[in-house]
Each structure stands twice: as C-alpha cells, then as structure tokens.
Amino acid sequence: MTCASHPPDDGGAAAPTGTADRPDPAADAVPPPLTWLYVPGDRPDVVTKALGCGADVVLIDLEDAVAPERKDHALRATAERLADPVPGPVPVHVRVNALDGPRAATEIRALAGLPGLAGLRLPKVHGPAAVHRAATWATGPAAARTPVPALYALLESARGIEHAFAIATAHPALRGIAIGEADLRAELGLRDDGGLLWPRSRTVIAARAAGLAPPPQSVYPDVRDGDGLSRSCAHGRDLGFWGRAAIHPRQLPVIEAAYLPTGAEIEAAEEVVKAAAGGAGAVALPDGRFVDAAVVAGARRVLALAHRRR
C-alpha cells in the first residue's frame, strides 16, 4: 500500500424542499469530483498520507473503519485536524456513525462548525427526516446558529432506495446521494450483482431528478483486483454514475482511467462545442445530427475532463 488506507428512522416521504437553491449540474461545465478515498479516522498518520495520494476528496471514516473502542479517539483526532482551515491539498469529508445510533449527534455537533470540514457523509439514511435531523444537529443552538455544511446521504437499505428522491430533495444542504452496496446486498440476500441493477439506476435517477450531480459508485472491496474494478467502473459509467469511492490508493488510477474520456469521445465533444459556438438553441453537426443545450453542456464537461487527463 503506497499511501496506506483501510477501509428507529422514519421512511416517510417529504415534499421536495432541497432543490430551489441548487445549481443545475447539467449547466456546469466543471465536472464533480471523480475519486473519493476512505481513510480510518483513528489513524491520523494514514489520513496525512491519504491527503497526498491524488484523490479528489478524502473521506475520513468514523464508522465502519474504526473499532468501537477507538471511536472517541477518532473523533478527537478528526476534530483536531479540521480545526485547520486548510487540512490538506484536497477537500476533506467525514463519514459519521449511523444517525439512529448513539454517536452521530455528538460527532456532527463537534465537526459541523470546523473550518476544515468540506462535507458530512450520512450513513444508512432511510428517509428524509434523517437528513433534517442531521442538519438540525449541525446548526447548533438557536443562539449560535452556524450554516449547515454540505451533506451527502448514503442509501444502504431497501427503505433508503424506496425513498431515494425524497431523501435527495430533503434539505437545501444536501449536495449528493450515493448507494452503499454492502449493507444493501446483505439485507436483500443478493447472490450476484444482477439484483443491484435497479437500486443502482434508482439512485442515479433520483439524484439527477433532484438536481444533484451524478452519484459516485460504491466501493469495490477487492483492492487487488484491478481488472475487476475497471470492468465494474465501465458498467457504472454506462448506468450514469460518476466516479467512485475507493478504500485503497491503488484503486484511484483505475477509477480515473475508467471514467476519463477516450480520444474518440474528446474528438466528438470538440465537434459539438465548435458547432455550438455559432449560435443558440439546437445546432446541426456536419453529419446532419442535431444537438441541444444539454448535449453541448455534456460536451463541455468531457473537454474539462480531457484537460485533467493531460
């Protein structure tokens, strides 16, 4: 390992309340983060190494990667790091413990106002009220309200998948959703990936319908199977996912390579953008195809990624 890393709520639907203040990702040529690296919160030395591994975002984990007797230490170490407004060269998010457990409220209250925190990952979100509860914990007492940090909901249960859109629109501070496949696979008793096809698509559609960026894929658990990871990423890209969470630095270049545009895709995007430069609305390409504004925005994102490849 070169950089060293490890790996009762309601389900009631709520009226969409979180989309009004969100920019439309389809209109933004700057793509969202591509790689997210999980790192255990009780290992400050490993966190330091992870920050230099090349991930777009480092996810400090207080949940699955930390043994119960080490969780208090993990929270203290994480709070100390995030007291620095610039804790590293890339944004730092924190995955707290389950929202229906005894630790989440304390963790969110301790971390939400820290200047180095870029986002909170909320595990096992079953319904929109869980997002509101986390946002309430994050704002602090009424006399000292602080802005809610960016929130990201992890859908890891059948209830979470069923309420994906309600969760995605639950609160203006919610900036993304993602699927947690290990817990979902266990709950559903799945024997292969075929049973995950609908939950995966549901997550992608809910995110886009809510005006959120495309969700990243769930982690690929076998850190030595680069070929399998590459194939899985190609499948995820076909389904509309964008990038992936990793549990080891060696997975990062595989994920990046799978999601970066090919030469043919770059050439096609350049053709679209060139044609669109001549006017507004739908435009015609030399081969007779018409493309609209959404296609042009997608082409600009491809070209932004092409610069990343170079």
Image (cartoon, grey):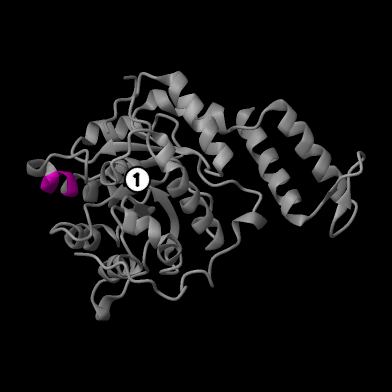
Question: In the image, residue 256 lies at what x, y percent?
Answer: 52, 30
Q: Residue at x 92, y 40 (%)?
A: 286
Q: Please report the residue visible at 43 percent of the width from the left and 49 percent of the height from the top.
A: 199
- Identify the secondary structure beneath mark 1: loop
- Residue 282 or 113: which is nearer the viewer? 282
Quarter where residue 104 is shown: bottom left
Q: Nearer the viewer, residue 279 or 91?
A: 279
Residue pictured at 41% horizontal, 49% vertical: 178
Q: Which residues are magenta?
A: 71-75
35 left or right, relative to 240 = left
Q: Quadrant of the N terminus?
A: top left
- The quarter of the rendered structure image containing the C terminus is top right
Please name the predominant secondary structure of the magenta segment in the image. Answer: helix
- The answer to whether residue 114 is magenta is no
Label 1 neighbourhood size at 10 Å, few (<14), some (14-19), many (20+)? many
Quadrant of res 2: top left
Q: Nearer the viewer, residue 160 or 56?
A: 160
Q: Can you name the residue that lies furthest to the bottom here?
A: 143
In the image, residue 73 lies in the stretch drawn in magenta? yes
Q: Is residue 142 above or below residue 128?
A: below
Residue 160 located left or right of residue 289 = left
Q: Which residue is mark 1?
A: 180
